[in-house]
């Protein structure tokens, strides 16, 4: 389970959910694994404003990962503006002369791919999308309930007395 | 604006328009459907440019490709007139281009001689380039639309080929070749269509609360989304129960499916949970949190027929001693949390409230449900004041049908006063067992799934051991029922 998921997960017990202490869940005895993946800058930019930053910092520090800055980066902080090349055109260009063979791949224009990710983006990507929790527990800070993680899958089923 | 002809496939008809609109939205192009008929595979649209046409069609599942419209008419004479009027100025561009000229007759046939005559009748366009059936630079196609069993076509089009669709993904993701499936795995083509209609796309986050073997998250990841899922049944995620496919052995799990398609980078992972006791954050309304975080939710909720719709909890209210027993035992490795039956319509309402709380503005919920119950009583389309219905697509079968319902989460400014508040409270309250009777009366009079005998027969734990008769994956649970009826 990639660490980004922990930014969305809280205690499953209904009466706990409204308590601020139930989020984030605290990893305990966690085994981590880094699985490399291509950096997805567009996704990082999109997800950044939805992140609960303070809680992400808490988890990073509890897992002994490099400290994250106190304030969340801005979208602009995630890419390095290319110094020479002019800004790529975002409008779709039609060349009336162009006759394309059917086999040509469809042109999907995008300005995002042209951008170079910043070190901040690389760091965030490493933590959120390359670091996985494979074994251990996730513990609610409010009620203390422990959710087991096995083979990378966390179990949030509640026992009979807690539903 | 130039006109284009979309060569649709002639199946899943009621999904075709919904898919086209969704594709236009994802591609960010303005599209107007000028001519569409449920009984024809030829659809005429306006698009701003050829680039827009390519971008639109690249991920289409329900079409073969898109063509620039060069003319149309109800007879060959009127077609030729229209081609002359509309495209006479373009002919010279293709004067020396290697080209191909073909005929696509829908519900009709032409002998090779007839085809030749038809193609020859366009010789006034003066294409002198070499004819190349393979890899031509320009490809022209005559489309003939026949009425059922008619001898002459009722309408004709000429188009210049622009680009092929993304329909090949249907083959790539075919369940027959998938690493790990189960009896309720969603047919690959329908999963891809659903992902399209829900606007799955790069940079977005999608979630399936009833993921089973992961069919929807995989389809969304194919279209570039980052995905995660959950299921109340941990075996379906971890795959320790094995696959429903005959002769399949070894460890088969959802992760393996993502690896098979090279999509593991887009897979956040999965967790075991009950939608009615979700561990996912339900953002507070006081702005202390940052609002919804999901771009889309796609699911095929359990109908209780074969999967046995269950939620966490005990059938009877637990007494003190039982509570104590659970408390003592829950940490033991063999402890199984108690589950109780639940109503299908109640879970639909839970899904809607969950979607309202967790989706971003304009985020989509696409959810499958049967159209009617066993007694042919039509099930109402569930609604929510904070969700706008975008499309309702119907997939008919012999004896039943099901719908794909798609909703758009409204912006807070567009929601009726106070409703978002209500939505979250409702979700937190859940639906009490006492409410079940009401739901039953309202939608499910006589619906078999609630009869005790039925419930006992349908052991949800037995699902994974069942053999799958084929890999269509279209609701094995219903097929099982049909077979029973036929007896
Ligand atoms: C129709 S299947 C979904 C199949 C999935 N679309 C696929 O392609 O494999 C419904 C799933 O819902 C799960 N389920 C049943 N009750 C549930 C609940 N209360 N919460 C979450 N999942 C549940 C079942 O275990 C089953 O895997
Ligand atoms: Zn708790």
Image (cartoon, helix red, strand yellow):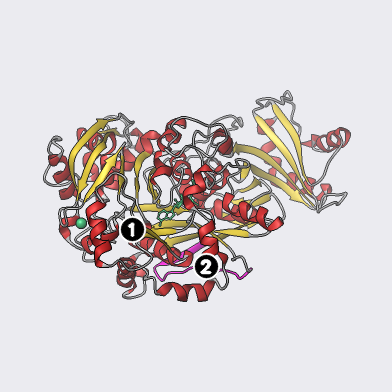
Chain of the residue on which disc 1 is drawn: B
Is residue B108 or residue A60 the one in the foreground? A60
Name the residue that disc number 1 marks.
B358
Number of labels in the image equals: 2
Residue B173 percent location from the top left of the image:
54, 37
Q: Main secondary structure of the magenta part?
A: loop
Residue A4 percent location from the top left of the image:
27, 43
Chain of the residue on which disc 2 is drawn: B
Residue A27 percent location from the top left of the image:
19, 43
Taking the spot 55% from the left edge, 34% from the top edge, the residue there is: B172
Secondary structure beneath dot 1 equals: helix
Q: Is residue A147 left or right of residue B34?
A: left
The image quadrant that residue B262 belongs to is top left
Which stretch appears magenta?
Answer: B376-391
Taking the spot 71% from the left edge, 36% from the top edge, the residue there is: B140
Q: Is mark 2 within 8 Å of ligand 1?
A: no
Secondary structure beneath dot 2 equals: loop
Quadrant, the C terminus of chain A: bottom left
Name the residue that disc number 2 marks.
B381
């Amino acid at each position: 389970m990639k660490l980004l998921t922990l930014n969305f997960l809280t205690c499953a017990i209904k009466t706990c959910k409204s308590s601020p202490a139930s989020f984030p869940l605290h990893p305990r005895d966690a085994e981590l694994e880094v699985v490399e993946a291509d950096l997805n800058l567009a996704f990082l930019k999109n997800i950044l404003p939805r992140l609960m930053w303070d809680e992400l910092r808490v988890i990073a520090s509890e897992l002994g990962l490099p400290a994250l800055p106190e304030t969340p980066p801005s979208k602009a902080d995630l890419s390095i503006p290319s110094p020479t090349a002019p800004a790529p055109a975002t409008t779709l260009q039609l060349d009336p002369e162009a006759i394309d063979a059917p086999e040509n791949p469809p042109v999907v224009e995008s300005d995002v791919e042209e951008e170079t990710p910043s070190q901040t983006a690389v760091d965030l990507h490493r933590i959120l999308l390359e670091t996985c929790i494979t074994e251990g527990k996730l513990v609610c800070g409010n009620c203390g309930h422990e959710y087991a993680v096995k083979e990378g899958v966390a179990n949030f089923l509640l026992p009979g007395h807690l539903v | 604006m130039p006109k284009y002809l979309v060569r649709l496939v002639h199946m899943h008809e009621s999904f075709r328009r919904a898919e086209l609109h969704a594709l236009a939205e994802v591609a960010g192009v303005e599209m107007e459907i000028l001519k569409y008929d449920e009984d024809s595979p030829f659809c005429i649209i306006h698009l701003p440019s050829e680039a827009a046409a390519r971008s639109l069609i690249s991920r289409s599942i329900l079409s073969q490709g898109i063509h620039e419209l060069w003319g149309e008419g109800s007879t060959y004479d009127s077609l030729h007139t229209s081609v002359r009027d509309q495209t006479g100025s373009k002919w010279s561009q293709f004067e020396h281009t290697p080209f191909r000229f073909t005929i696509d007759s829908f519900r009709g046939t032409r002998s090779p001689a007839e085809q030749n005559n038809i193609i020859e009748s366009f010789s006034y366009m003066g294409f002198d380039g070499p004819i190349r059936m393979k890899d031509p630079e320009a490809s022209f196609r005559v489309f003939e639309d026949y009425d059922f069993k008619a001898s002459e076509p009722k309408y004709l089009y000429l188009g210049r080929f622009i680009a092929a669709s993304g329909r090949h993904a249907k083959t790539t993701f075919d369940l027959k070749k998938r690493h790990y499936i189960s009896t309720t795995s969603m047919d690959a083509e329908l999963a891809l269509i659903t992902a399209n209609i829900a606007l799955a796309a790069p940079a977005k986050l999608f979630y399936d609360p009833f993921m089973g073997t992961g069919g929807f998250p995989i389809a969304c990841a194919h279209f570039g989304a980052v995905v995660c899922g959950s299921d109340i049944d941990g075996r379906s995620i971890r795959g320790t129960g094995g696959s429903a496919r005959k002769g399949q052995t070894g460890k088969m799990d959802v992760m393996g499916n993502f690896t098979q398609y090279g999509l593991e980078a887009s897979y956040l992972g999965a967790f075991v949970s009950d939608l009615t006791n979700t561990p996912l954050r339900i953002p507070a309304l006081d702005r202390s949190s940052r609002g919804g975080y999901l771009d889309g939710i796609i699911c095929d909720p359990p109908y209780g027929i074969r999967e046995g719709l269950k939620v966490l909890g005990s059938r009877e209210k637990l007494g003190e001693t039982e509570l104590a027993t659970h408390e003592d035992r829950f940490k033991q490795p063999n402890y199984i949390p108690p589950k109780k039956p639940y109503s299908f319509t109640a879970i639909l309402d839970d899904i809607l409230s969950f979607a309202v709380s967790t989706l971003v503005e304009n985020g989509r919920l696409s959810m499958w449900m049967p159209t009617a119950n066993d007694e042919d009583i039509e099930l109402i389309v569930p609604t929510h004041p904070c969700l706008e219905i975008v499309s309702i697509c119907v997939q008919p079968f012999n004896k039943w049908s099901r719908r794909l319902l798609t909703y758009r989460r409204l912006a807070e400014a567009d929601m009726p006063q106070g409703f978002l508040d209500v939505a979250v409270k409702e979700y937190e309250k859940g639906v009490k067992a006492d409410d079940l009777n009401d739901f039953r009366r309202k939608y499910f009079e006589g619906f078999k799934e609630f009869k005790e005998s039925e419930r006992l027969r349908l052991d949800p734990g037995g699902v994974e051991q069942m053999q799958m008769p084929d890999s269509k994956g279209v609701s094995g649970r219903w097929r099982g029922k049909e077979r029973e009826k036929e007896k």
